[in-house]
Image: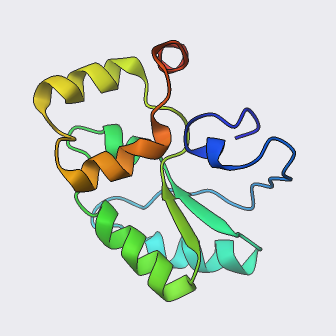
């Protein structure tokens, strides 16, 4: 987050960022999504980032679009899909599998796309 890499690159270099919470989704179908977001917003979250792990898994989270829409609607908070850059090992595998070919998935992975050298550091 402090390096402004991956999805955190949307924040200006001088902007104050504070992590106000983190948690898991609690496994399918994401039973912790509502409760975690409620607490994060009460703690001052201006945005919620859904972890890069949700897009690089095998398979990627099938509920990510629903989670994003729900959180934005329920809490009126910006929801960003992704945190750190996608590691090259996942980029190459998912490219071969065609996982992220749809326009929706391309949109989801865009915030975590960087250059090859940055992705390689996350392998």
Q: Nearer the viewer, residue 81 or 53?
A: 81
Q: Where does residue 25 sit, x and y in percent of width and height?
A: 43, 61
Residue drawn at (86%, 53%), measured in percent from left and top?
A: 16
Q: Is residue 16 above or below residue 116?
A: below
Residue 97's quadrant in the figure? top left
Residue 31 in view, yes or no: no
Q: Where does residue 123 sit, x and y in percent of width and height?
A: 46, 16
Residue drawn at (70%, 70%), measured in percent from left and top?
A: 46
The residue most toward the bottom is 74
Residue 22 placement, left or right of 18? left
Residue drawn at (70%, 41%), measured in percent from left and top?
A: 1
Residue 78 in view, yes or no: yes
Q: Nearer the viewer, residue 54 or 114?
A: 114
Q: Is residue 69 above or below residue 23?
A: below
Q: Is residue 30 above or below residue 75?
A: above
Residue 10 placement, left or right of 101? right
The residue most toward the left is 97
Residue drawn at (45%, 34%), measured in percent from left and top?
A: 113
Residue 103 placement, left or right of 6? left
Residue 43 placement, left or right of 28? right
């Amino acid at each position: 987050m402090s390096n402004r890499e991956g999805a955190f690159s949307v924040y200006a270099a001088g902007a104050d960022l504070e992590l106000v919470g983190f948690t898991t989704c609690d496994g399918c179908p994401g039973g912790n999504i509502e409760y975690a977001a409620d607490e994060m917003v009460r703690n001052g979250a201006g945005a919620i980032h859904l972890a890069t792990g949700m897009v690089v898994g095998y398979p990627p989270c099938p509920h990510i679009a629903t989670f994003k829409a729900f959180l934005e609607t329920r809490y009126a908070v910006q929801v960003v899909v992704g945190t750190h850059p996608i590691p090259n090992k996942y980029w190459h595998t998912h490219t071969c599998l065609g996982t992220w070919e749809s326009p929706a998935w391309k949109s989801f992975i865009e915030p975590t796309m960087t250059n090859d050298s940055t992705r390689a550091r996350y392998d």
